[in-house]
Structure formats: structure tokens, C-alpha cells
Image (spheres, rainbow, N blue to C red):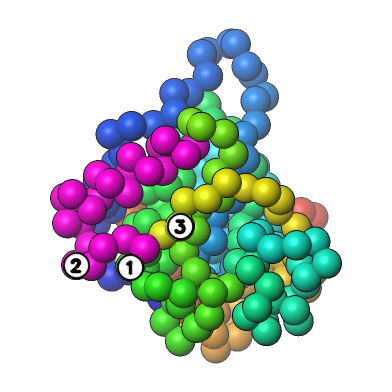
Amino acid sequence: MATTLREPIPAPLHDIAAPASGWAAGQRDTAVFAGGCFWGVQSVFQRVKGVVRTTVGYSGGAAETANYSAVCAEDTGHAEALEIVYDPSIVSYGTLLRIFFSVVHDPTQLNRQGADIGTSYRSAIFYSGEQQRETAEAYVQQLDRAHVFARPIVTQIVPLDAFYGGEEYHQDYAMKNPNNPYIQVCDIPKIASLGQQFPELFQEYARAGEP
């Protein structure tokens, strides 16, 4: 479940600088986060302005076990993860982290999110490069020092070895199954929280080919 904060948590004091105007038009960066069931993580980030593409999948384990049936056994090392391709001139890595900690999940729950229990549901930031690592580590320290959450953050910050795209039926699952009881209870409130806490970044989402 997402946190119950009604206001967004403080913005990171340390962030990755946006590309200089006109210097890197069309530049795209990638972030990989894990925060419980990947349906809900995707349902939030695909509605953030500046996010170009999202893909649910798996990170933390080997290629041969990067499939849903194996990951559900909870012994592969994989977490259900989301790959986010974004335009850093519109939304920064630090802002994505802020949304991740504010709206997407509860970063104080160890190896679970609500009723979803297991290491595949763990909170994790899979970083690519030192700038992402430094930004993520500094932000967690900032939030813990400020006691933003009642308990310490348990989010793993680990290097991204690989991201493996998930099965097609998992992609855009919340969009395709809005009446699913799990989506209604766990994910629709997260979308509402995004609109409430970050109205300047919220946009409605439509799959390719839809109006």
C-alpha cells in the first residue's frame, strides 16, 4: 500500500542537474525502481509528465529466472521492478525519487507491501552510475534525518546489473483491468494521490493506439 501522507515529502536537496537548454535535445535517461507489485508502480509513473515509457519486469536475479512463475517462488533474487525512460529536461531523477517515496509505496516495510509479502516485493532502487547512487543515498539520509516517516527507510540502493522486461499480460495491467478488486484497492488510490500531491506533474495516460 502507498503511504498515507497527504502532502508530498520534501524535495531532495541533492539532485542530478537537468541538461543545459539546447545541449541535449531529446535526451532520455532511465531509472529502475521496485516498490511492491509492479502493476501499481507502473500505474503511477506512466502518469508523470516527462516519463516517456514504462516497462514492468524483474531485476536482481539471473536471466533464466526472470519470469513471473519463477519470481513468485521467492527464491530467485528478483524484485518486481519498473524501468522508467524519462526526459530529464522535464522531470528530474530526484523528482522521480520523491514520487517513489511519497506515492508509490511505503519504504519502511521490509520485503513486503501490505498483504504482498516476499523479497520480490521489496523496496529497491537499482542505480545506473554514480550520480543516481549519490542522489538516492543522499535523499534517503535526508528523509531519515528529518524523520519524515515514523520508521527508518529500508529501501535497498544497489547497482543495476540487468533489467528483464516482464510478460506482455503484465504491461499496463492496471490500465487494462481497472475493475480488478486488487487494482481498485491498491492502485487507484495511488493514482489519486499522485494527482493530489503533484498536480503540476500529473497527466492522464492512454496506451498506444488509444485517444
As rendered, which of 196 and 129 lies closer to the eye?
129
Element under label 3?
Answer: strand
Q: What is the x, y in percent for residue 114?
A: 42, 82
* Residue at image mark 3: 156
> Which mark identifies residue 108?
1
Quarter of the figure that contains the C terminus: bottom right
Q: Main secondary structure of the magenta part?
A: helix
Quarter of the figure that contains the N terminus: bottom left
Query: Disc 2, disc 1: CB below 8 Å?
Result: yes
* Number of numbered markers: 3
Looking at the rendered image, the disc whose residue lies closer to the viewer, 1 or 3, is: 3
Q: What is the x, y in percent for residue 128?
A: 59, 39
Q: Amino acid at mark 3?
A: Gln
As rendered, which of 2 and 110 lies closer to the eye?
110
Looking at the rendered image, the disc whose residue lies closer to the viewer, 2 or 3, is: 3
Query: Disc 1, disc 3: CB below 8 Å?
Result: no
Q: Earlier in the sequence, mark 2 or mark 1?
A: 1
Element under label 2?
Answer: loop
Q: Amino acid at mark 1?
A: Thr
Is 210 situated left or right of 96 in this image? Answer: right
Furthest toward the left, the residue is 146
Spatial CA span between label 2 and label 3: 18 Å
Seen in the picture, residue 144 relative to 74 is either above or below; the reply is above
Spatial CA span between label 1 and label 3: 11 Å
* Residue at image mark 2: 150
Seen in the picture, residue 152 relative to 30 is either above or below; the reply is below
Tell me where residue 82 sits by quadrant.
bottom right
**The magenta stretch spans which residues?**
132-154
Q: Quick one: label 1, few (<14), some, or many (20+) residues within 10 Å?
A: some
